[in-house]
Image (cartoon, rainbow, N blue to C red):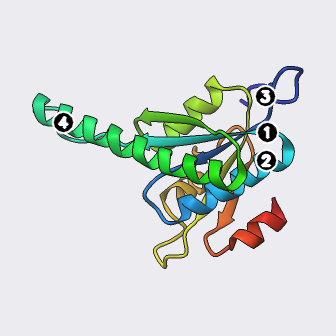
Amino acid sequence: MVSKRLSREAGHRRKFLAIVDETPESERAVAYASRRAQATGGVLVLLFVIEPTDFQQWFGVEKIMREEANAAATAALDTAARRVREQLGIEPELVVREGEPAEEIHKLIEEDQDIAILVLAAGAAKEGPGPLVSSIAGKGAAFPIPVTVVPLNLSDADIESLA
């Protein structure tokens, strides 16, 4: 079931959601989503999902690992946001979640009815396009909004001309 998007209603702005992670393609997704947000008067939302660990039986270790993961997530989001601010002069919304990536993306889309487009980037590795793009091709992973998949090899000029 697709929930109603509010991005076209008065007082709302269309949001473009890009996922920030340690993959090289993440930067391409952020570049495209930020240009689309700027070109359409929309908002850029950057999401970093911290995947769960298996250290739950050792509370002290889990706490340290969680703190380190949160620090890494915040640093990655800050780096991406700084680049967007410097290049385009727009201020993105930053979100950190903990859980399985596809599930957390779904939850955020359901919670924020202004998110209208999910932007992912496909990697160029021989192993495949990357875990997120692979997950949307799998059964039951379809998102309730359109998904734009940006090729890793698009240059900034290519992205600018397309966005």
Percent x, y of residue 28:
62, 62
Camera-near label (2 vs 4) is: 2
* Dot 1 crowding, Cα within 10 Å, few <14, some 14–19, many 20+: many
Name the residue rendered at 79%, 47% in the picture: 38
Of all residues, the one furthest to the top in this rendering is 11
Percent x, y of residue 116:
75, 38
Kind of element beneath mark 1? loop
Q: Amino acid at mark 4?
A: Ile
Name the residue rendered at 58%, 45% in the picture: 141
Q: CA distance from mark 2 to mark 4?
A: 38 Å
Up/down of 7 relative to 139, above or below: above
N-terminal-most mark, 3 or 2: 3
Could you tell me if the residues under marks 1 and 2 are in contact, i.e. CB atoms within 8 Å? yes
Camera-near label (1 vs 3) is: 1
- The residue at which mark 4 appears reads as 64
N-terminal-most mark, 4 or 3: 3
- The residue at which mark 1 appears reads as 42
Left or right, 124 with reference to 8: left
Q: CA distance from mark 1 to mark 2?
A: 6 Å
Percent x, y of residue 54:
21, 41
Q: Amino acid at mark 1?
A: Gly
Kind of element beneath mark 2? helix
Quadrant of the frame with the C terminus: bottom right
Quadrant of the frame with the N terminus: top right
- The residue at which mark 2 appears reads as 38
